[in-house]
Image (cartoon, rainbow, N blue to C red):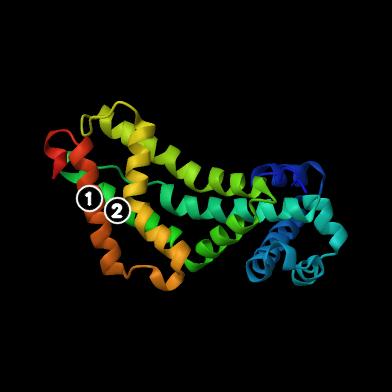
Amino acid sequence: MQIQAGRTEGQGLAAEAQAGSGARGIRKRRAILAAATEAFLKAGFLGASMDEVAAASSVSKQTIYKHFGSKEALFVAVVTSLTNAASDLVHGDVPEPEGADDVAAYLRDYGLRQLNVVLTPRLLQLRRMVIGESSRFPELGKALYDSGPGRAMRAIALALERLAQRGFLTLEDPAVAAAHFNWLVMGGPVNAAMLLGDEAVPNPTALRRHVIEAVRVFLAAYAAGDARR
């Protein structure tokens, strides 16, 4: 089965406005997404009931299909909505370092914020569910990657490029440096949590220690001058 491409949140809201449904349509769409999120996380794609989603969001199944087109497209919309919201928490407006002495602290804060969001039980559950369904529905994996890791890598690359332009880092390819930073920070804790369960998520002290060491290794390769500290 192939998933029909789901609309982004912005496209969905624009479509509602164009259809003349206005604020009421937007509220319905958000209610459907919230109900569908709980249903999919609880029962997975196959186990989730559209009747339950309709009842929980106080709309008819016809209304759900009017907004999203299919159960598959609704699933993609849920994945996109959750990962976009998580990414906003990590990559929103964050003050950049004022000088070279602040670079290490800036990167540590960035990495710790990223880990704390990704390692929440809800997002770990979503990631496991998408991986489980991705062989049958590859669009799910793409939706998760584009809104999650893909967006993270682009945001980190831009941040590192700005630091390099200010003379704090030395790098030839921001995308490669972003990949190194991302996996130094994310690789161990996320892999352990994905394979061993939520109980394998390190405690806050261990997470901070891990991020400090990851940033130290990253700066040993990429820092310029005083930013190595």
Q: What amino acid type should be assigned to the residue bearing mark 2?
A: Asp
> Horizontally, is 104 left or right of 64 in the view?
left
Q: Residue 47 in the image: x percent, y percent?
A: 73, 68
Where is residue 52? Give x, y as percent.
78, 71
Q: CB atoms at circles 1 and 2 under 8 Å apart?
A: yes
Q: What percent of the width, then of the height, locates residue 177? A: 33, 36
Cα separation, mark 1 vs mark 2, equals 6 Å
- Residue 224 vs 34, above or below: the answer is above
Q: Quick check: can you spot residue 99?
A: no
Q: Is residue 105 above or below residue 155?
A: below
Specify the label residue 51 is tagged with: none
- In the image shown, does 50 or 142 lie closer to the viewer? 142
Residue 183, how many percent across, how many down?
A: 36, 47
| Residue 55 visible from this viewpoint | yes
- Viewer-closest of 24 and 60: 60
Residue displayed at 33% across by 57% down? 112
Q: Which three-letter amino acid code belongs to the residue tagged 1?
A: Ala
The image quadrant that residue 132 belongs to is bottom right
Residue count near mark 2 (Cα–Cα under 10 Å), binned few <14, some 14–19, many ≥20: some
Q: How would you rate the neighbour count of disc 1 (Cα within 10 Å): few for under 14, some for 14-19, many for 20 or more?
A: some
- Residue 64, placed above or below residue 148: below
Residue topped by disc 1: 105
Residue that lies at the very extreme toward the bottom in this rendered image: 199
Quarter occupied by the C terminus: top left
| Residue at which label 2 appears | 109
162 sits left or right of 59 in the view? left
Q: Is residue 105 left or right of residue 158?
A: left
Where disc 2 sits, the SS reads helix
